[in-house]
Image (cartoon, grey):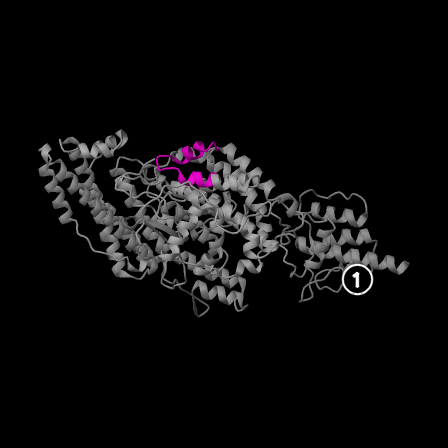
Amino acid sequence: MKRKILSLLLALSLLLSLCPAALAVEDGVRETDFFTDQPHANVDFADMTYRHIDSEPILEEMDGVRKLLPDGGNGKKVEEAFDRLTGQFLEIITMYQLVQIRTYQDVTDGEAAAWHEHTARLYETVADALVLLIQDILKSPCGGFLREQLTEEDIAYYAGYKAKSGEQLARLAQESALENEYMAAAYQTCTVEYDGRTWDQAAADAALLAGELAAEAYTGISRSIAQKQNALLGDIYLRMVALRKEIAQSCGYDNYGDYAYTEIYQRDYTRQEIRSFHQAVKEHIVPLADALYPLYLSGYDEPALREDYAGDAALDLIEPYIGRLSSEMAEAFSYMRSHGLYDSDYSDAKAEAGFTIFLTGYGAPFYFYSPCGEFRDLTTTVHEFGHYNNDYWQSAGWNDGSKSIDIAEVHSQGLELLFSCFYEELLGGEDAAAAAQDYLMLSVLSGAVIEGCLYDELQQYVYDTEHVTLEQINRKYCQLCREYGVIAEDDPRTEMYEWYGVPHTFTSPCYYISYAVSAAGAFAFWLDARDDYYAAVDRYLAFTALDSSYGFQESFAELGMESPLDPDYVEALADGLWEALEIEERSGMLPPVDLTGEEWFAPAALALYAAGLIEKDESGRIYPGRPGTWNDAAALLTVLAGRPYRAKEDGKIITRAEFAEVIAALLELPDNAESPFSDTADGAVAALAVRNIVSGYADGTFHPDEPILRAEMWAVTYRALINVASRLIGKE
């Protein structure tokens, strides 16, 4: 599916971010032949400089060409002039791309921001004029050379094009200005006042880790920062939304989402069609991610996940393995490094983003990333090289199409998943590889598939809602977080604010679904690799080498693969990953997610859990802080009694005194002890207290009528078991 001249600027590919058997490969380069050679400039990125270009001379030259068109004898002159004009057009695109990189390298660079706005306006103006000139040439007796270059589809496209009005061009310029306003605001440090001190998020994080800030205070500070950022960036976003609705309407669309899906991303599915995919992800992928999360947490402290992979560190690590996959990929990687076409090191001025952009005039992709100092830097490097390799082999003529974003994200996420087979060798051991694999799988499932759907639904809501307010967005975001398992179903919040943390929402609206559908498709290569690794790699390379005439679903069909959008495919994918990742078997060996071992009740909980008296739910939790019920009590009392014990009141909360009474009765304890508590004289409570089976509060009270927490029930049961064991030993 070609992206014609008016959509030639590539959208930025921003980040997000268990091999079944060891892969036996020989050192060296694996020869492949999937791609067509393309020209690449022998120029280092450091020597690529921005040149300021004005539109007037270009537009004047176009007018000069028009004067030549009536005379068929001017065909050669028209062809030469047209070649010059398309060369200038490609240079404009290249200048836009260079300055785009610069704005991300330093968000405080006002000069770069001004150049960015200028080149965006320049591009739209010249592109619009160039298409109109193409129309005139094709109608003229001088158009033979051009008709030879174009397909019938191309000719129909250019013939049907309607020029942008002055108002449309002005709106596009306003959009660029708002994006720059967002960039400047988003990367300013946000501070709030709390307890007589000024806090930013980094300071609060550090204080919490150092034990200098209580969890409750930390939560309050973080929420205040989020609300402040939400208000600041939300104001910019609402102005963007209103403007983008105008842009869509001026192009004949009732809804900006439809405009973006069709005109910007050229998807081969509609917003309405993707909703069944949303639902399938909620039903099948969310439970899978929930089950994988405890496995990820169990390996969270693996040193390999805490290493610093920023800058050349990650590139040095992955370089030997790129050649094992493909000689063509190795060529692209060598070109990137030898010409310095990357920026992935630390800088306080950089935007927090990752992308690969194609510098058209040089035939040179460029990789940008702002590292975070952990394993994600390594996976992101692999991710972006998936983009880089595709861009390195793409053609860059004035009429060449570019692949859809959905397809491009298969290139990146597919390589991430296939590359994971090298983890054991690269990271130095099975434990490190397993932890890294769980991290990667969870990041793709949650950060790509689930969040891709969540943010797509959010933006569909925003653009569907007339005069949408910030409060409505915050409430909808909270609702979607609950539906997609980001927060618990019983979470009391009605508003959440952190949606502003995704740059795409501001700079690439309606982009995020690309991560979801592409990740769903990319998993197919990983599952295929379990049977034949290099056959799966070759299928991935064949997918990457398809030309831009193929749509997203067409690309999978061309390789005999299922559409990732089919709900049945999503269900089968979840089942396949559940089995391949051995979720069931591995989960059974893990302690509960919400039990660190440091809690006061941990010995009791761990002992009862090991004995099978406490069960985890699907998410791996045992909920120690929840009030206990008579059903919970019955399960524990059955063990103490050695026979089935029925709940007195099904589903009802049990109090501290009630639980003490049934425990004392079961142990057949006398009730003649004097109570040590000031607020109860209950004999059962006293009997348990003198035997250290129950305890009260520091002020000498017991709170007999309050609900007993599950953790407290476990502690009491554990002590009761110890008491029984001690008595039996004493009898012996």
The residue beneath circle 1 is 691
- In the displayed structure, does residue 633 sit left or right of residue 121? right
Magenta highlight: main SS: helix
Up/down of 426 relative to 31, above or below: below
Q: Quadrant of the C terminus?
A: bottom right
Q: Residue 676 placed where, x, y %?
A: 75, 65
Q: Secondary structure at mark 1?
A: loop
Residue 413 percent coordinates (x, y): 46, 45
Tell me the quarter of the picture where residue 646 sits: top right
Give the vertical position of 258 relative to 600 (above or below).
Answer: above
* Quadrant of image for the N terminus: top left
> Residue 645: x and y, percent?
77, 44
Of 18 and 693, which appears nearest the observer?
Answer: 18
Task: Left or right? Give the position of 141 relative to 532.
Answer: left
Q: Is residue 558 magenta?
A: yes
In this picture, residue 313 sits left or right of residue 95: right
The spot of residue 273 in percent (x, y) is 42, 33
Mark yes or no: residue 15 visible.
no
The number of numbered badges drawn on the structure is 1
Q: Nearer the viewer, residue 267 or 42?
A: 42
Task: Give the residue displayed 38% in from the left and 51% down from the top.
Answer: 355
- State which quadrant residue 513 falls in: top left
The foreground one among 400 and 471 is 400
Q: Is residue 276 left or right of residue 606?
A: left
Q: What type is the residue that disc 1 sits on?
A: Arg
Q: Residues within 10 Å of mark 1 (few under 14, many from 20)?
A: few
Residue at coordinates 43% horizontally, 35% vertically from top-left?
274
Q: Magenta region: which residues?
A: 539-561
Q: Could one spot residue 266 in this view of the protein?
A: yes
Q: Is 336 located above or below residue 643 in the figure?
A: below
Residue 138 within the magenta-colored segment of the rendering: no
User: Furthest-bottom residue in view?
Assistant: 196
